Amino acid sequence: MNSALLLLHMLVGVFLLGAITHQLVASIPRRAARNGTFIDRYTSVNRTTFTAVVAGLYVAGVVLGAMIYPKYRLDVRVPFEDLGLAWAVGLFEVKEHFAGIGLALLPLYVWLWRPERLQSHRRDRIAVTAILGLIVWNDFLVGHILNNIRGFG
Amino acid sequence: MRLRFSPTVFAVAFSLVYAVVFAFDRPLFRYYPLHGDFNWGNAVIKDAGPAMSWYGFMADSAIVALIAAVLIPDALADRVLRNKVWLIPGAAMLLVVYLLRQFFVGRALG
């Protein structure tokens, strides 16, 4: 059961990684004229449509992570400690705390992406989206690294 | 009466409270997954197995942030923090990494 939840947690992470990266990259202003390159096509999406998907996937990822966290605490972290892998324990600590702060940013993130605030709150919107992107990338890579060291089995 | 919720205040209050309760190790409760026990406050139960504080930090922060987000008007927060609000969760994240530095540069275990 825990392995299935871990797999689902990872798949949610993959979709979330794609969605928030796409939205963030498309939000960065570009000066160059659009000439149909891959980057032009990649960035010419309706950025606001990603918001609900990102928020939903983020919540799903945190809920799934919270469900499998006790299993990690008992069956993964304890062996890490026995092996003296302090850095691995530390990476997970950063991951969990970042995920928690990111969860609290979601209402603000959704609020900032409302059409009426696209001009007035531009810096906050890009910065909060970038922070969420950083959290998602960090947490995905850390989860992958830790699972490579010792998965649930 | 209609309750108004300020996403700006919620994000700011949550980030600040989270950084403080984490820095001072003050979770609302701890969970002991070995036997499924909960314990209020930050006291550690001996012989209960490994403790988990994250749920308690989240509960602390969510409760305070929810109250603040309902009580403090969004217009006020927006006027003070517009286009600067991201600095507070960003600073909270940097503080968390700083507080966890012993895992990467020292001997945090055993």
Image (spheres, coloured by chain):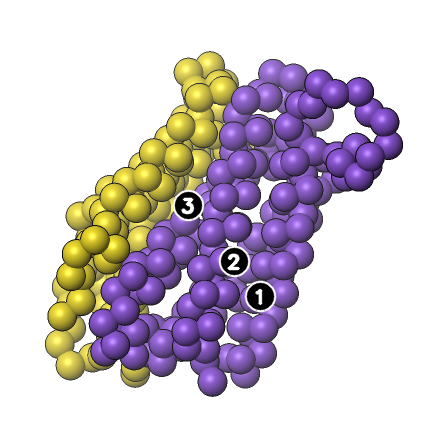
Chain colours: A purple, B yellow
Q: Assign a secondary structure to mark 3.
A: helix
Image position, residue B46 (x, y; %): 13, 76
How many discs appear? Answer: 3
Which of the two discs, 2 and 3, sits closer to the camera?
2
Q: Earlier in the sequence, mark 2 or mark 3?
A: 3
Residue occupied by mark 1: A10
Residue occupied by mark 3: A101
Crowding near the residue tagged with mark 2, few <14, some 14–19, many ≥20 C-alpha atoms within 10 Å: some
The answer for how far apart the CA atoms under marks 2 and 3 are is 16 Å
Depth order, front residue of A66/B63: A66
Residue occupied by mark 2: A140
The answer for how far apart the CA atoms under marks 2 and 1 are is 8 Å
Image position, residue B100 (x, y; %): 25, 51
- Residues marked 1 and 3 touching at CB (< 8 Å): no
The answer to whether residue A69 is left or right of residue B16 is right
Which residue is rendered at x = 80% and y = 39% of the image? A38
